[in-house]
Amino acid sequence: MTSHWCDFQNADVIMNIGSNSAENHPVSSKWIHKAHERGAKWIVVDPRYTRTAEQADIYCPIRSGTDIAFYGGLYNYIIENDLWQHEYVLNYTNASYLLDPEYEFDPATGFFSGWDEEAGKYSNHSWHYQVESETVWDTSEGGDYAWAVAEGVPEFTPPVVQHPKRDMTLQDPLCVFQQFKKHYSRYDMDTVCSICGMDKETLELVYSTYASTGQPGKAGAVLYALGQTQHTYGAQNTRAMSVLQLLLGNIGVPGGGLNALRGEPNVQGATDMGMLVNEHPAYLKWANTTDRSSLRKWLESQTYSDGYYTNKPKFLISSLKEWFGENATVENDYGYDWWPKVPTSPDFTMMSTFELMDQGVIKGYFNWGMNPCHSAPNAGFVRRSMAKLDWLVVADQVATESATFWKAPDMNPEEIDTTVYFLPCALIYEKPGIILNSGRWMQYRNKAVEPWDMAKPDYEMCDLIWREVCRLYEEEGGANPDPILKTKWDYYVDGKIDPRPVAWALNGYRVAGTECNTTSAAPKTDLLPGYGDLKADGSTACAMWIYSGFWSNNDAPLDAAEQPIGRRDNSDASGIGLNSTWAYAWPNNRRILYNRASADMAGKPWNPEKVLVEWTGDKWNLVDAADFVAAKNGKPVPPNDKAFFMLWEQNGRLESYGMADGPLPEHYEPFETPVESNPLNGALNSPCMQFARNESTRKGDSAEYPIVATTYSVTEMWQTGGQSRMCPALVEAMPSQFVEISEELAAEKGIEKGDKVRVFNNRGSVVVDAMVTKRIKPLTVHGETQHLVGLTHHYSWAGVFGTGDTVNDLTPNVGDPNSFTPEYKAFLVDIEKA
């Protein structure tokens, strides 16, 4: 999320697309309403007429799974009507960069250049830029990169800086802008309407309204959630929104940004922590068996040639020092070889783990803080796979579907030999710790009450398991003891595991000045003020470079209230809602990312009434913490075009070589689609989607299952309902799950409001209540009537109240090739009266 919720009030136009603020993120609506009251236009693009749409100025229906067609049409409209932000796009994006001469997209096949049919994936070589010149790092004494060859820094070959060829007139046919313009010229409004299902008049109103934010000084905010991400091209949907905001100059400005509305309190924190197979905490890449199989390979493959990620060696070495402490030395590559390496095969992402269970490869499974027998796609297959495990450990607050999977209506307990261990986990109110909200604000949460009965906080359970594993290694030995016994694990206060020493580790500290495992009321710490002090020579330790600075008060290292994270000053010196003295926003207490782009090339704000940064003539006036190099060696750095310094180009990417499924977002149909052809290209589905060929997915055909279904949440229930369905008052407010269907479909099927209906496809069948409503309308797609239904997903057979069938038995276990996110938001079903 590039901004934060309070910043929504600064927008001139707000577009909810794939999100439903009023029902799923109610507090965010407070700030949308502030903008609305000040005259901002509010657009909602959604398959359903939601309560958010009811409050908005413009509602535009859309067939679920066709967002990229919508965005492509908007790009075309912006360019054809010359509504793009010229100075911003020319100087702050890669629009002027010349692409490789082999770069190509073939509309007849739907493939970009570089497709490898045998491998089933792209080579991105032809998506790169032409090179004008090259320079090397200056590692000489006093040079910018002298640190790279300093004592204690592991040897690696510094990257070569390639300077791309540019055409500042944007006329060269191989420049990104011309290729972009050519690519989306196919996305005319008639074609978009035919694919997406809205009428042309409404679409043009949406396009003209949102495109008006391309005027310098105006700002448009995109608010999205799972409606965008839970597709086989969810990452490209997110890319598409980023491209839109770059084209209009809406990234880095007050009231702009690309804003992900998180669905629960700490999703942002879990994302930061790298809770994915291939991700190291703080958005670094985990060790693997190919280009990251050794420390040298990691440093050479991951360190950027220019921009702020030239500092990746500092981040990684500091992480290794935190991981292995005094055992990590330059002689042993700081313990890098003790880290496990992610293999290229098999794939251990979430959906694949159940395939491996089904095949008998995975015999044991830790199920911690999730409920895949309810929440995973094709949940029936998940349950059947779990039945083949030898053992399963579930850590949760209540006995979820995953903790009691053998009790499912379709399971026979007599045929299941899995031993299940249930670890009761403390609720959020029963433990202290750090939490991050959607706006990247870090806050400390104090414990309200003691854990109930035998429940323990997660970190206490981890500590018990860890200490027992170490005891067994010490007493009995075992394979590969070093990664276990040489790991630093000293997060104790008075002999008990404690989140505060963990906070020191996340913040970062100078190794020589810090003593952990403290029994002192005033422990010795040398906590760092920020990530700018991290070193690659082993003298600093830091588990999360992006968080550095949030816990930096050495005078009170055990007092959260005295740390930046504990600030509770709600005054606002900015006058535009930055609230910089409330809590701490990573990175570096920066409230709006890429804020250099809020000012023009001379450093003057596009909107002088909403200043984030401003060049005064001899220095920068920083209302927000600078997301660029504002000073170097104590001297101010005058304005330049480096507005996105987390990229090596330091310009935003309209075209990107970093995606697995194409350099530009291109419309493909979902895994299951009601249509037989794609009018924009010769490929019906994305060739890169994951798991589509697995036998377990059981793809449905529109001849049998002609109705598009999507899933969504209701305000009264939370996630899989484990906690909320245990509360009778909430179940009384929302007593059962339902399928939302149009009056037209209800008439066609002979269904009335309140009827029990069966919703089914190749993967499963569920019985739910019918909600016949005007909020969903049939759409006209390629000249044919297309019905859509919406399903709530919080209910299931486990628990005491609010029981029912598991709706995710219907969703397909296919995923995005970049994030491996499942496709919950567009699949095929049929319905009938039960």
Image: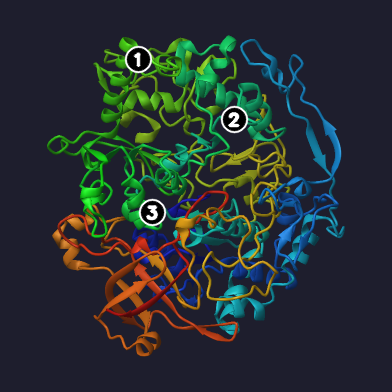
Category of crowding for the residue at label 2, using alpha-carbon neighbours closer than 10 angstroms: few (below 14), some (14–19), many (at least 20): few
Residue drawn at (47%, 10%), measured in percent from left and top? 512
Distance of mark 2 from mark 3, alpha carbons?
A: 28 Å
Category of crowding for the residue at label 3, using alpha-carbon neighbours closer than 10 angstroms: few (below 14), some (14–19), many (at least 20): many
Residue, disc 1: 473
**Horizontal and vertical percent for residue 459?**
30, 30
**Horizontal and vertical percent for residue 259?**
50, 55
Residue, disc 2: 289
Category of crowding for the residue at label 1, using alpha-carbon neighbours closer than 10 angstroms: few (below 14), some (14–19), many (at least 20): some
Residue, disc 3: 376
**Horizontal and vertical percent for residue 321?**
49, 18
Image vertical order of residue 781 relative to residue 712, above or below: below
Instruction: Please name the amino acid that badge 2 sits on.
Output: Thr
Distance of mark 1 from mark 2, alpha carbons?
A: 26 Å
Instruction: Please name the amino acid that badge 1 sits on.
Output: Tyr
Residue 253: which numbered mark, if any? none
Residue 225, visible in the rendered structure: no
Image vertical order of residue 660 relative to residue 61, above or below: above
Instruction: Please name the amino acid that badge 3 sits on.
Output: Ala
> In the rendered structure, which disc, 2 or 3, sits on the residue that comes first in sequence?
2
Distance of mark 3 from mark 1, alpha carbons?
A: 35 Å
The reply, left or right, for residue 594 in relation to residue 227 is: right
